[in-house]
């Protein structure tokens, strides 16, 4: 049903606020569960040293918690569309949540780092099924079109990234096992909310094959976004997975640092990035933010302990802007259906998220503590170079994304 215009709606930012807050219960339930899902990514940050001590493991062994998680997540991106197009979005979300509940709980019972790494892999499969489908569900059901939906999704990501380390610190101060049990309980609540408030979503007219996301990468624009995001994610997850060992703080202090980091991520992804995009354009914002992130990483790597803390927190602002721009580019740059484009894009970028946590400690072992940050900074610069070199292939987004945001009545034009 078409909504009557209200005073002040000529202001685009007022439109965004109205669209963002006036959502069906199903969207809020999915977004709430998404917050908890993203909490699981940063949950282990403040307790990584505690896990290493408790399981008598090295930093590189403990970093495999991220590697197994994101490696399975990357591969699972080829499966999510295949599954959801056959059993529906609601059942896929519930299956993903159920897997997270089971494997998060099992993670808390681990007696060795090998067991914990294996359980995190199962957790990654559940999270992949949930997170990729949640984006499609939110985009499909949100009022205000995909612009509001992406902001809502990024809000959930930022809030989850901020609260994950905080929860990990609060529960992990007593035992490194408690954060895993806490996440399992929260995801169980999310399971109940999705069951209660989300009705089954319409299935796409055509079932997605396992190779559709790979085929979608044949589009030059989407391939360019994915390649740039690959390098960016290496830098991103060097900060997330390696910095806790460098800071070497108590769970509470480390949790506070990454809570502040996550808050900046949320604020800049939802409030600052859209305004800068409107003023300067997506590609200029993305390129500048990637270069600034590279500079931040170098200073982090060579600065004092206090400087490293400040640079870690500041990186949240840059990561927040990058996340928003990359998501919009990935969903709008090609003519592939959004779930397929998202799956192809995530398939590429999550491999870097799997590689960075493993390689950063290894690089330190081979050289010194500064070089992992230099490598991450170089990766961020490479991401910016891809954006600049391939800018002509990415301009399609600026021209086409706005008309594709929504139909006239505010319901997303989901079928491409």
Image (spheres, rainbow, N blue to C red):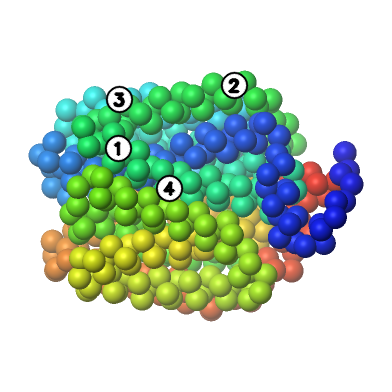
Which residue is at a point 49% across and 59% down the rendered structure image? 320
Q: Nearer the viewer, mark 3 or mark 2?
A: 2
- Which of the 4 quarters of the picture holds residue 194? top right
Which residue is at a point 52% across and 34% down the rendered structure image? 33
- Which of the 4 quarters of the picture holds residue 14? bottom right
- Name the residue carrying label 4: 161
Can residue 183 be seen here? The reply is: yes
Rounded to the nearest angstrom, the CA distance separating label 4 from label 1 is 15 Å
Mark 2 and mark 1 in contact (Cβ < 8 Å)? Answer: no
22 horizontally vs 57: left or right? right
Can residue 83 be seen here? The reply is: no
Q: Nearer the viewer, mark 4 or mark 1?
A: 1
- Name the residue carrying label 2: 195
Name the element at disc 3. Answer: helix
Rounded to the nearest angstrom, the CA distance separating label 1 from label 2 is 29 Å
Rounded to the nearest angstrom, the CA distance separating label 4 from label 3 is 22 Å
- Name the residue carrying label 1: 170
Mark 3 and mark 4 in contact (Cβ < 8 Å)? Answer: no
Rounded to the nearest angstrom, the CA distance separating label 1 from label 3 is 20 Å
Compare marks 1 and 2 and give the one earlier in the sequence. 1
- Which of the 4 quarters of the picture holds residue 200? top right
| Residue 390: numbered disc | none
């Amino acid at each position: 049903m078409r909504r009557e215009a209200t005073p002040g709606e000529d202001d685009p930012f007022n439109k965004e606020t109205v669209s963002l807050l006036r959502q069906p219960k199903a969207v809020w339930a999915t977004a709430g569960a998404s917050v908890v899902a993203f909490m699981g990514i940063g949950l282990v940050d403040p307790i990584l040293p505690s896990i290493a001590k408790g399981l008598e493991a090295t930093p590189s062994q403990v970093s495999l918690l991220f590697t197994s998680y994101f490696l399975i997540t990357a591969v699972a991106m080829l499966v999510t569309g295949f599954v959801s197009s056959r059993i529906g979005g609601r059942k896929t979300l519930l299956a993903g949540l159920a897997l997270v509940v089971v494997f998060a709980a099992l993670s808390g019972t681990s007696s060795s780092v090998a067991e914990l790494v294996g359980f995190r892999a199962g957790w990654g499969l559940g999270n992949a099924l949930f997170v990729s489908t949640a984006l499609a569900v939110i985009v499909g059901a949100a009022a205000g079109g995909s612009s509001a939906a992406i902001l809502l999704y990024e809000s959930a990501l930022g809030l989850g990234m901020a609260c994950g380390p905080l929860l990990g610190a609060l529960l992990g101060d007593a035992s490194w096992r408690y954060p895993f049990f806490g996440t399992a309980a929260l995801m169980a609540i999310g399971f109940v909310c999705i069951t209660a408030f989300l009705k089954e979503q319409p299935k796409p007219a055509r079932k997605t094959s396992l190779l559709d996301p790979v085929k979608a990468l044949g589009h030059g624009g989407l391939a360019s976004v994915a390649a740039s995001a690959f390098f960016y994610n290496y830098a991103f997850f060097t900060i997330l997975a390696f910095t806790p060992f460098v800071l070497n703080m108590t769970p509470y202090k480390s949790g506070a640092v990454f809570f502040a980091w996550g808050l900046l991520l949320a604020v800049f992804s939802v409030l600052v990035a859209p305004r800068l995009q409107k003023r300067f354009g997506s590609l200029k914002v993305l390129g500048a933010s990637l270069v600034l992130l590279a500079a931040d990483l170098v200073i982090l790597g060579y600065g004092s302990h206090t400087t490293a803390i400040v640079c870690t927190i500041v990186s949240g602002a840059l990561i927040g802007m990058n996340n928003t721009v990359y998501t919009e580019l990935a969903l709008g740059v090609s003519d592939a259906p959004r779930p397929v484009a998202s799956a192809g894009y995530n398939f590429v970028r999550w491999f870097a998220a799997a590689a960075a946590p493993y390689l950063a400690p290894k690089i330190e072992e081979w050289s010194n503590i500064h070089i992992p940050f230099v490598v991450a900074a170089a990766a961020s610069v490479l991401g910016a170079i891809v954006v600049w070199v391939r800018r002509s292939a990415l301009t399609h987004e600026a021209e086409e994304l706005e008309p594709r945001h929504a139909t006239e009545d505010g319901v997303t034009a989901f079928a491409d």
